[in-house]
Image: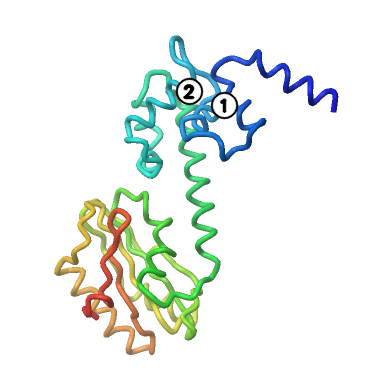
């Protein structure tokens, strides 16, 4: 106990860039601002700027939005502020990815999906940060409980090729009764394109041949989605 007290007293002599660590130790992690948490990741500042100063500038570049920061690559983060080298930038990317995975694992506890909102909430952590278009399928049993989800394909910013045979092959292997198709539009426009409509009809008809029903097709943009089922487009 005496040694612990001594450690806390010595914190007063810590450098400015170390003080968020002091606050976390004394008051708990929930009391820290986003900038203070990032400062802990950075550990040190550069001449004229503490780690906290740099953190505030980083957040200013993304308008304080951690979701936007999480979409940046290591090289993109390095360009935000002077003094952000590989180590600091990699640390930020790794920490945000861990946060995404934690959120993803919390959401995906083999839930039962009974609405488009449930489906969106389940898959969004997986797709939120993608800058290219990707196609996923969620496989469910007869009770609408998730068996698994799989990324079927990925492509550029404006489209991706999706093979119906692969989707149905997974459905057979997983003994799925239902599937939900999901893909993102990096542009943020969630209105279906003619190819999206055509693929939905094709997948619906193909699924009938093996008694696998397509329940919905979601197009996901920035924190929003279009549901073919909700819009009576199935």
In the picture, measured across the screen, residue 134 lies left or right of residue 126, that is: left
Secondary-structure class at tag 1: helix
* Residue receiving disc 2: 52
Picture coordinates of residue 193, whole percent (x, y): 16, 66
* Residue receiving disc 1: 20
User: Which residue is at a point 41% across and 34% down the rendered structure image?
Assistant: 74
Q: Quick check: marks 2 and 1 in contact, CB under 8 Å? A: yes
Question: What is the crowding at mark 1: few (fewer than 14 residues within 10 Å), some, or many (at least 20)?
Answer: many
Picture coordinates of residue 112, whole percent (x, y): 49, 75
Name the N-terminal-most of marks 2 and 1. Answer: 1
User: Which residue is at a point 40% across and 41% down the rendered structure image?
Assistant: 66
Q: Indicate the quadrant where residue 47 lies.
A: top left
* Furthest-left residue in this view: 194
**Residue closest to the eye, 24 or 79:** 24
Q: Is residue 17 above or below residue 139?
A: above
In the rendered image, which quarter contains the N terminus?
top right
In the picture, measured across the screen, residue 188 lies left or right of residue 59, that is: left
Question: What is the crowding at mark 2: few (fewer than 14 residues within 10 Å), some, or many (at least 20)?
Answer: many
User: Which residue is at a point 68% across and 19% down the rendered structure image?
Assistant: 11
Secondary-structure class at tag 2: helix
Picture coordinates of residue 23, whole percent (x, y): 61, 28
**Residue closest to the eye, 29 or 196:** 29
């Amino acid at each position: 106990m005496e040694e612990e007290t001594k450690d806390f007293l010595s914190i007063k002599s810590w450098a400015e860039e170390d003080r968020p660590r002091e606050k976390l130790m004394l008051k708990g992690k929930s009391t820290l601002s986003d900038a203070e948490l990032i400062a802990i990741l950075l550990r040190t500042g550069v001449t004229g700027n503490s780690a906290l100063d740099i953190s505030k500038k980083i957040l200013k570049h993304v308008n304080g939005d951690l979701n936007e920061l999480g979409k940046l690559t290591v090289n993109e983060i390095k360009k935000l502020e002077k003094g952000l080298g590989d180590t600091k930038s990699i640390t930020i990317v790794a920490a945000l990815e861990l946060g995404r995975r934690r959120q993803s694992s919390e959401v995906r506890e083999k839930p039962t999906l009974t609405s488009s909102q449930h489906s969106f909430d389940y898959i969004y952590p997986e797709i939120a940060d993608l800058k290219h278009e990707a196609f996923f399928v969620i496989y469910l049993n007869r009770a609408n409980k998730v068996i698994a989800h799989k990324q079927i394909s990925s492509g550029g910013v404006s489209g991706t090729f999706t093979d119906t045979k692969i989707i149905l092959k997974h459905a057979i292997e997983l003994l799925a009764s239902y599937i939900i198709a999901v893909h993102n539009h990096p542009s943020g426009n969630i209105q279906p394109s003619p190819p999206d409509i055509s693929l939905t009809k094709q997948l619906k008809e193909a699924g009938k041949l093996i008694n696998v029903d397509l329940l919905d097709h979601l197009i996901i943009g920035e924190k929003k989605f279009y549901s073919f089922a909700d819009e009576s487009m199935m």
